[in-house]
Image: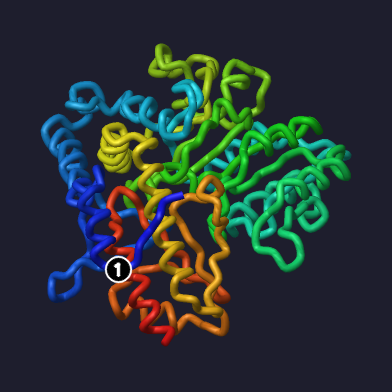
Amino acid sequence: MTNYTEGLDYAKEQDKNDTLSHYRNQFHIPKDKDGNDWLYFTGNSLGLQPKATQDYIQQELNDWANLGVEGHFEAKNPWMPYHEFLTESMAKIVGAKPIEVVVMNTLTTNLHLLMVSFYQPTKKKYKIVIESDAFPSDRYAVQTQLNFHGFDADEGLIEWKPRKGEDLLNIEDLETILEEQGDEIALLLIGGVNYYTGQYLDLKRIAEIGHAKNCMVGIDLAHGAGNVPLELHDSGIDFAAWCTYKYLNSGPGSLGGLFVHEKHAHNKELKKFAGWWSHNKSTRFNMRQPLDIIPGAEGWQLSNPPILSMAAIKASLDMFEEVGMKALREKSEKLTGYFEFLLKGLNNDKIKIITPSNPKERGCQLSIQVQDSDKSLHKKLTEAHIITDWREPDVIRCAPVPLYNTFEDVYRMVEKLKEILS
């Protein structure tokens, strides 16, 4: 455990010794009307724009202008195989093999496409387990999948809930659910890092619990990719999906990614929806060939991808390739630990951190519950150019992101919170 010290001088000293501090200058930091940097703590919702992104997108615009359709083959980064330029870096970020990863579509679209393959209910084994406070989009996705297959969504949905009086999920309760109802459960679809509490769950154990009852296991990593160290291949989960606009800084609504474990890579019996980008690359343009699905995650693609979005993703992934998740994680744990230290130092009974205190069980988000507060607290922070994330009824989500947030950011945020609360 790091020994933290109070005071601005300590924060500045930590920033001075931070080997990643220069990466902040590679991002556009929003500023107030006087040119002062905002304190931006919402990388968990939308990551900041890398300065290089504009050049990456401009390259593709130039090639489109100068080459037209020939850019598919003659561009500096040919568009035909463009998604392949992202695969290796993305695989490293999520701890996967290249054959297991592809960048495509958006998160909920990918979850639906994956459930076509991995949610194959029978009359007896059809139920789906989600965490009780799953992100709404996940809930809507599984409810509509249940309905699509002819089941009652209320009856078919099982919620893994925190114990009474607690905020966090207990893995033993998931085991109990599977022991009692496992013969009726077809799929576990769990948020690997919970969007509300920031709890980072043990994916390997979830996979073991699900597979012991012959259930498929999928993970939503919207708040995990680029944030926490993921070992998706070793975890044994069947599939996962994530977005790239949060911790991966690819821009609003940018493409997502998906993972399908290598054990499913060559299973031609696996049901899936297909399009021409699912088809064998060597015969794709023969046009009149019977469908020949590409092995691995690429086989879940449907259409040729939006290159401008992929260019923005490439700009970010090139930076991640340079920095590495290990260094990011080390700084993240220090930064979040410092944040927790300062919040506890306020000695305010109204403040409760609902994110796990163990750094191994959280990413860089801290969710701060403020008793008797309403959105006016968030509004006051915003008026002070401190950008946090309000979640009803009384939680402020704050994510000091290691690529661009500083110890001084954290110090100044807590000082302003102290001032507002007093």
Residue 222 visible (yes or no): no
In the image: residue 418, left or right of residue 107: left
In the image: residue 270, left or right of residue 391: right
Residue at 83% in and 55% down: 155
> What coloring was used for the rendering?
rainbow
Whole-percent x and y of residue 64? 18, 35
Q: Which residue is mark 1?
A: 7
Whole-percent x and y of residue 319? 26, 38
Residue at 22% in and 29% down: 69
* Quadrant holding the C terminus: bottom left
- Image position of 179 with respect to 134: above or below: above
- Asked whether 390 or 56 is in front, the reply is 390
- Image position of 349 with respect to 218: above or below: below
Q: How many marks?
A: 1
Residue at 29% in and 41% down: 316
- Asked whether 107 or 283 is in front, the reply is 107
Q: Amino acid at mark 1?
A: Gly
In the image: residue 235, left or right of residue 222: right
Label 1: state its secondary structure: loop
Residue 349 visible (yes or no): yes
Res 7 quadrant in image = bottom left
- Asked whether 30 or 403 is in front, the reply is 403
Whole-percent x and y of residue 71? 21, 28
Res 39 quadrant in image = bottom left
Whole-percent x and y of residue 332? 39, 49
- Badge 1 density bin: few <14, some 14–19, many ≥20, Cα 10 Å: few
